[in-house]
Amino acid sequence: MSIGGGSGEPEAVEWLYQVVGWRPPLGLCRAGDLCGLYPALFQDVSNEVPELPCVSPVSNQVFERRLIEKYIAENGTDPMNGQPLSEEQLIDIKVSHPIRPKAPSSTSIPAILKALQDEWDAVMLHSFTLRQQLQTTRQELSHALYQHDAACRVIARLTKEVTAAREALATLKPQAGLVVAQAVASQPHVTAGGAGEPMEVSEQVGMIPEIIQKLQDKATVLTTERKKRGKTVPEELVRTEDLSKYRQVATHAGLHSASVPGILSLDLCPSDTNKVLTGGADRNVVVFDKKEEQIIATLKGHTKKVTSVIYHPSQSVVFSASPDSTIRVWSVTGGNCVQVVRAHEASVTGLSLHATGDYLLSSSEDQYWAFSDIQTGRVLTKVTDEAAGCALTCAQFHPDGLIFGTGTADSQIKIWDLKERTNVANFPGHIGPVTSIAFSENGYYLATGAQDSSVKLWDLRKLKNFKTITLDNNYEVKSLVFDQSGTYLAVGGTDIRVYICKQWSEVLNFTEHTGVVTGVAFGEHAQFLTSTGMDRSLKFYSL
């Protein structure tokens, strides 16, 4: 049954008016029009305006059809009076879609203001929650970035350790099973031939007959060549009067880092003296081209300052030593370290290349000198003077390569026989640690410098000091070098001085360095002179 349409519409409407007890004023609506009735109807079960209204003929009440049907299905009675009622008895009220009245809470200005305040409070709470979440997210991001940075540092450290371990492994592999330095005490003592002092010899690999024969053959060739040259001076050699006119022609201060100033060592390539090799306090080795005035290579790997450098005469290879107790072999063309020689357990203080170009001599504060193969990185022999028990400060091969000299911290100069590994001569006379030694190309003279502000000249044939050059008080001797012909001797230290051999008179003096001069070297045929110092500069002098 429905109300709002069909032929019985007036009667139904009249009946509904009777049910609800209300009748519209005359003329407000036509018969059967419920537009004014429906908004006032609230169903009795939920007290809300029904979406699908219907009337119960038993109690004459308006209900939401959905709710009354559920109630009838469960109870079968009218909810108002409990009398029996079925779904077929319900009468639908057909009306247009209702407009729900506003809630009572929004029908006044104070209620609206309260609603707006409540909405504002909700927005502020939401904003506060978002700020908290943003702060938490920022903290999490900061923590993640910190963890990332820490991870990067750990990775960098591990990479460095892996590189060092690989280098150590590459060095240890060929030395596996060899005697270490601490085991020297178990080695037999060898009696010195000349000085009669007992030595401790640590046979790392051994001076096998093939190596000794190689050294002897090279010495024979060099001696023969020297005899052929005799006392003649090369025609290309700069004359003394021209040398005395030398002046500074170039200076370079950007080779090494300014944050750790100082160039500590210097060498020139024997086959091309335009190539300059330097070692700095910044732990770097630099190869510089004098002619092009540019750096060829910067070699990094030492963990401490570089105190000794050597340029190979025939290969694009250089050598360096450091207080980090390592000797490194570098490829100039590749710009990388190709071999690490670990011959010592303390600072390496001296380095010298044998005339064959295959072996290195090194001295150290651990009181040992070592003879090593540069191709394999193996230590062929290590020797210390047990009686002296003193750190070695420098080392230098004789031009023939069968003997060499070492300086000690207690002012001694010791001459050693390489084949026999014995101390064959000692030269006392200096006061303080020996800082530099140099053999003349003629094979007869040895120049030595120490912290007593003097340079002593020794005759290796007579084993005695024949000349002492006394320098100014507090003069620091850091470097001594003869030119390739043995005609001139350069002294580097507080300043630079050049002496002509045999007369031993001073022909040059340079004071351009603002720091102590640490290295000095002659170009080919003494056509130029170069020096390095603690002022971080590399200087060249010529006409």
Image (tube, rainbow, N blue to C red):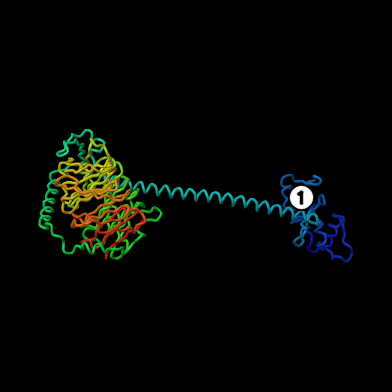
Residue 125 is situated, as x and y percent measured from the top left of the image, at: 67, 51
Query: What is the count of numbered marks?
Result: 1
In the image, 22 versus 196, the foreground residue is 196
| Quarter of the figure with residue 293 | bottom left
Residue 333 can be seen in this image: no
Instruction: Tell me the quarter of the picture where residue 285 sits.
Output: bottom left
Left or right: residue 128 versus residue 63 is: left
State the residue position of label 1: 46
Q: Quadrant of the C terminus?
A: bottom left
**Which residue type does callout 1 highlight?**
Ser
* Residue closest to the eye, 372 or 12: 372
| Residue 527 located left or right of residue 420 | right
Q: Nearer the viewer, residue 433 or 523?
A: 433
Q: Using the image, determine if residue 436 lies above or below residue 511.
A: above
Q: Residue furthest top?
A: 186
Q: Quadrant of the N terminus?
A: bottom right
- The residue that appears at 31% across and 44% down in the rendered structure is 347
Q: Is residue 406 visible?
A: yes
The residue most toward the right is: 26
Helix, strand or loop at disc 1? loop
Task: Please provide percent x and percent y for residue 221.
Answer: 11, 53
**How many other residues sit within 10 Å of disc 1, few (<14), some (14-19) or many (≥20)?**
few
Whole-percent x and y of residue 454? 27, 48
Residue 34: x, y in percent? 81, 61
